[in-house]
């Protein structure tokens, strides 16, 4: 093609293509662009977490509940995660002692971070923020916050990859409150994740 005062000679097989001043897009260009996209774009992941939880109150008894969480995050080219989770109370709370009155938290949104490699995805949740619905409530009385406590203590939720575009695992967590309180938070979390594959 001609560019100002310079006339170039196209490489063999590229006559009339976009790279030679024409209108056609050849396979070499398609392959090159596809390679750049695969290298530079983050992976998009979604998934669910089903949680059965319990909180043991010293000297009183326990409360249990169940939650369903939608997870959305990206994995950058360096393996770092960023995203969020939206949790909804499915059932409960059911307590073995009287005295706790609502309204209780029915939903939470929290940050998702962590790292990933070829064999596992390591989720850290709630470290950069948690918001509850309703904002004015008696709080979460079951053990759903066990995963937040674990993340704050540096323990990730490790989900093993099941292939190039999937990961799953059943993860039990048991943590005491951070600070003076000694309530025990327990949760069993079934996590299923999948990525949106590049075309």
Image (tube, rainbow, N blue to C red):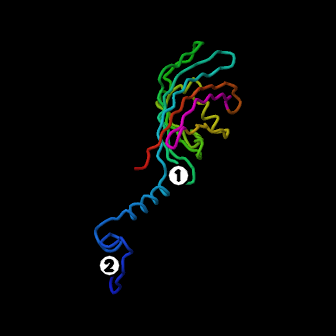
Q: CA distance from mark 2 to mark 1?
A: 38 Å
Range drawn in magenta? 162-177
x, y (%) of residue 190?
54, 29
x, y (%) of residue 182?
70, 26
x, y (%) of residue 50?
51, 28
Q: Residue at x 49, y 42 (%)?
A: 165
Q: Indicate left or right for 48 with 157 as reference.
A: left
Tag shown at residue 76: 1
x, y (%) of residue 97?
60, 12
Callout 1: few (<14), some (14-19), or many (20+) C-alpha neighbours within 10 Å? some
* Residue 1 belongs to the span the image colors magenta: no
Prevailing SS of the magenta stretch: strand
Callout 2: few (<14), some (14-19), or many (20+) C-alpha neighbours within 10 Å? some
Q: Indicate left or right for 77 with 156 as reference.
A: left
Q: Residue under circle 2?
A: 1
Residue placed most toward the observer, 9 or 21: 9
């Amino acid at each position: 093609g001609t560019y100002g005062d310079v006339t170039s000679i196209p490489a063999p097989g590229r006559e009339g293509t976009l790279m030679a001043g024409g209108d056609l897009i050849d396979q070499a260009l398609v392959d090159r662009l596809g390679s750049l996209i695969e290298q530079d774009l983050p992976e998009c992941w979604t998934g669910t977490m089903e949680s059965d939880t319990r909180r043991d109150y010293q000297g009183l008894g326990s409360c249990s509940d169940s939650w369903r969480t939608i997870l959305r995050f990206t994995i950058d080219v360096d393996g770092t995660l960023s995203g969020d989770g939206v949790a909804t109370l499915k059932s409960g709370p059911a307590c073995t002692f009287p005295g706790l009155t609502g309204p209780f938290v029915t939903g939470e949104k929290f940050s998702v971070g962590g790292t990933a490699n070829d064999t596992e995805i390591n989720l850290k949740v709630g470290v950069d923020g948690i918001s509850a619905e309703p904002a004015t409530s008696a709080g979460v009385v079951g053990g759903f916050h066990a995963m937040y406590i674990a993340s704050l203590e540096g323990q990730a939720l490790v989900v093993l990859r099941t292939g190039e575009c999937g990961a799953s695992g059943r993860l039990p967590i048991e943590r005491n409150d951070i600070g003076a309180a000694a309530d025990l938070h327990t949760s069993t979390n079934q996590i299923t994740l999948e990525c949106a594959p590049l075309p």
